[in-house]
Amino acid sequence: MNPIVIGNATVYLGDCREILPTLPKVDAVITDPPYSDNTHKQAKTNKGKGYGVQLVTFAALDDDGFLSVMEACLAAAHGWVVSTCDYRHAALMYQHKRFVRLGAWVKPNPMPQISGDRPGQGFESVLILHSGGRTKKWNRGGGSGVWTFPTEGGGTEVPTQKPVALASAFVSDFTAPGETVCDPFMGSGTTGVASMNAGRRFVGIERDPRHFDIACRRIEDAQRQGRLIA
């Protein structure tokens, strides 16, 4: 569980359910955990014959697993917990005392409905919680919890990789310069890249060694680019 330190980022290779409770509290958690098994099965590319090719190969989270992860994230944060998530999982949190709002990431270029028998899914849920550790404050005043950004499309290194622009908006909206952001499902490091670009500190956890290596490279590249610009 020894961390790797990359400038203002500290990253761990391992299971967040074991590592997160051992770490000091952070200012905010911004993350993208696995979705439900049903959503993973339905997530396909439009390549190949018939109904496409399976896109997601990593393990899904069941309802109990998702609730456990959200409790761990709330315990780890002084303030905001922001998570793109399966809408079925988001619904489990509606009555939670730390639930604040259900937002939406609207996709101008969503994957078409391959079967053609129903509308395609054009948004993903953004679950917004607050731990209660400090007064609620975000940086867009009366603005809505709707973020409109295109998907990364093809060519990403990790399935379901979120756009840097989306992660950057979350970091900008829910944190202040110099604060620490944690992503316990770091994946390819998109939240880490956004945090480095915005002058935040970052703590990431990822259990897939290949994804972890990609994240380390991307975070290092982001910091190097920042130094060149400075």
Image (cartoon, rainbow, N blue to C red):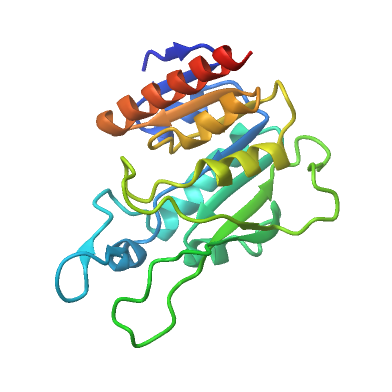
In the rendered image, the vertical position of residue 66 relative to residue 48, given as above or below:
above
**Residue appearing at x 33%, y 84% in the figure:** 116
**Residue appearing at x 21%, y 74% in the figure:** 51
Q: Position of residue 176 (x, y in %)?
A: 75, 29
Near-viewer residue (94 or 139): 139
Near-viewer residue (154 or 53): 154
**Residue appearing at x 30%, y 76% in the figure:** 114
20 sits to left or right of 100: left
Q: Residue furthest bottom?
A: 117
Name the quarter where the N terminus is drawn.
top left
Q: Position of residue 26 (x, y in %)?
A: 63, 27
212 sits to left or right of 99: left
Q: Position of residue 14 (x, y in %)?
A: 34, 28
Q: Residue furthest left?
A: 49
Q: Position of residue 174 (x, y in %)?
A: 71, 40
Q: Quadrant of residue 36?
A: bottom left
In the rendered image, the vertical position of residue 35 relative to residue 185, given as above or below:
below
Count every numbered label the image shows and give the total: 0
In the rendered image, the vertical position of residue 22 relative to residue 118, given as above or below:
above
Name the quarter where the C terminus is drawn.
top right
**Residue appearing at x 34%, y 88% in the figure:** 117
